[in-house]
Amino acid sequence: MNNLEFLYRQIIMDHYKNPRNKGLKGYNHVHLHNPSCGDDVIVEAKVENDVIQEINHTGSGCAICCSSTSVMSEVLAGKTTQQALDTIQDFYHLVKGEPVQNEEALGDALVYQGVSQFPARYKCAVLAWKALEQLLKGEQDE
Amino acid sequence: MLDVEKIKRDIPLFQNYPNLIYLDSCATTLKPRYVLDKMDEYYQEYGVNIHRGVYELSYRATEEYDKARKKIAKFINASFEEVIFTRGTTNSLNMIAQTYGMANINLNDEIITSELEHHSSLLPWMQVAKKKGAILKYIPLNDEGRITVENFKKVLTDKTKVVAITYVSNTMGYLTPIREIIELAHKQGAVVIVDAAQAAPHFKIDVCELDCDFLAFSAHKMLGPTGIGILYGKKSLLDKMDPEEYGGDMNNDVFHDNVIVKETPYKFEAGTPAIAEAIGLGAAIDLLEKIGFDNIRQHEKELHKYALEKLSSVSGITIYNKTADIGIINFNIDGVHPHDASTFFDQANIALRAGHHCAQLVTKWLKCNGTLRACLYIYNSKQDIDIFVKTVQEVVEFFRQFSEV
Ligand SMILES: Cc1ncc(COP(=O)(O)O)c(C=O)c1O
């Protein structure tokens, strides 16, 4: 598999074409935008008793950004806030090509390892994860 | 015909990246050694300040700086006093809006612009309009996305005070019929500010023939260095305008409660200017004139035609500006976000731009999330086009495998 095939794996394209948990339900959300490329996501989460019950999203952008939003919404649902924050950090390490603490917790998000070969795409991969990180740390947009 | 191989040999960046296919010249052009050498020469042989010392070296620096201004004046058929050095097109256009605009625009005046503008042509006037309560009007684009004289007439009124318009669109590569527009605008007493950033690299500009009031361009888009550009203004207008910045070099006499500023162009150039860069721009103009604009245009036209012909055999792409007047191809690969596509081009050593190209109203007009833009210039060859088109084909095929997902 060459780098590009590794970057655009079937699973990534599947989440891009068929995003999971798309559509907001009105929970607290954070909106992030990358003006240089136009990637734009809103991520919302329902957190009860410190456990993420549900993550939903909407937005538009490239395959890497949109798919990683969708994958995140599946991978992090069901985790405690702290577990999710740890996994988010691990995801940043993963896409930078740095060692990760807990591979298992990343689940399907491990396919984004390919991004580490494409530093220009780092921002696309992490946009939704940054939004959720801010949300879990107590920020929210109107 | 241009000797592309020789032009490439004279650009040091190609020595470091011999396989680079550079299709991003609208963003900035690569720099010939001659330009870099002329700038080095300043720093190494006479790198002192201008207009200051009366010593020999300062005299030489001042001479070279003025010589560059003379070259530029001749290049656009202006006079010496009408050529102001700025930091670039953006700086030039903001300066006009902040000085001429803030002094002359009033409540309910009208400012005409277009959706084809680069943000640096549009946004300074949007700010003036907001601050002054003036009205910003957009020339309706025709079906192709062009500015036409007919449509310009629809928005021109006796309230029009300023027309801020691009000479060549940096996304669509269309030439604006500015001569006719300027003539009509003048009949209504409006001044016309021309954004020539994408014109200056490609053809001869003649400000007298155009009769424009102000015109701006950047050195770095025409083989010159970054950090310097030109603002041309008619002397009669510049004489009446106040400087935007005050400081050293721009005044004749300073009193406790007053200052007598110099004549144009010096009154607009406070502080130590970008001396090496001015000299570099002069050198770039020497080179462009040596190569010859007729040859440059012919080369670009041939390449452009060749590229469009080859691309017409690729199915699954959309070209938004097949009738472009300048070698700019604005396109998308159907169903593929421009940023996904651009990673493939990057892997093939092809530098091109993806996104909205600092002209978001154009992408909005095209109703897309951004586009890919390939720009052709003097160092591009047919071989570059072959590799480019092959890569386009590969991207189409790569993403087609997922169309069933
Ligand atoms: C048409 C046009 N106008 C203005 C600019 C701004 O030029 P600069 O960034 O050199 O100030 C550009 C370049 O990006 C351009 O293409």
Image (spheres, coloured by chain):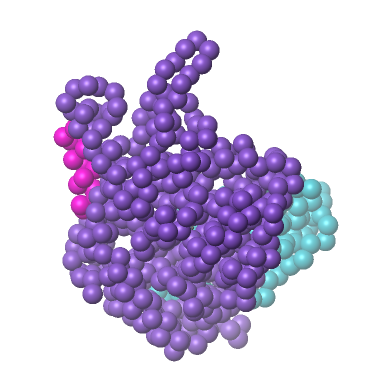
Residue at image position (35%, 61%) is B204
* Residue B280 x, y percent position in the rendering: 28, 46
Q: Residue at x 27, y 70 (%)?
A: B295
Chain A visual colour: cyan
Q: Is residue B222 visible?
A: yes
Vertical placement of B217 versus B272: above or below? below
Determine whether, in the image, residue B112 is placed left or right of residue B351.
right
Residue at the top extreme?
Answer: B256
Main SS, magenta region, reads helix
Residue A81 higher or lower than B55, as above or below: below
Where residue B329 appears, x then y in whole percent? 46, 73
Location of the N terminus of chain B by quadrant is: bottom left
Residue B381 falls in which quadrant of the image? bottom left
B259 displayed left or right of B287: right
Residue A136 placement (x, y as % from top left): 71, 47
Residue in front for this viewpoint, A64 or B201? B201
Q: Is residue B369 magenta?
A: no
- Indicate whether B341 appears above or below B244: below
Q: Depth check: give the residue in front, B235 or B396.
A: B235
Side of B312 relative to A25 (left or right): left
Which residue does the image show at 58% across and 70% down from the upper left?
Answer: B148
Q: Residue B309: where, in percent of width, then height?
A: 40, 86
Evaluate whether residue A90 shows in this view: no
Q: Quick check: is B44 in the magenta stretch? A: yes
Q: Colour of chain B?
A: purple
Q: Nearer the viewer, residue B231 or B280?
A: B231
Look at the image and tell me in which quarter the C terminus of chain B lies. bottom right
Q: Which residues are magenta?
A: B33-47
Query: How many numbered marks have been drawn onto this rendered protein structure?
Result: 0
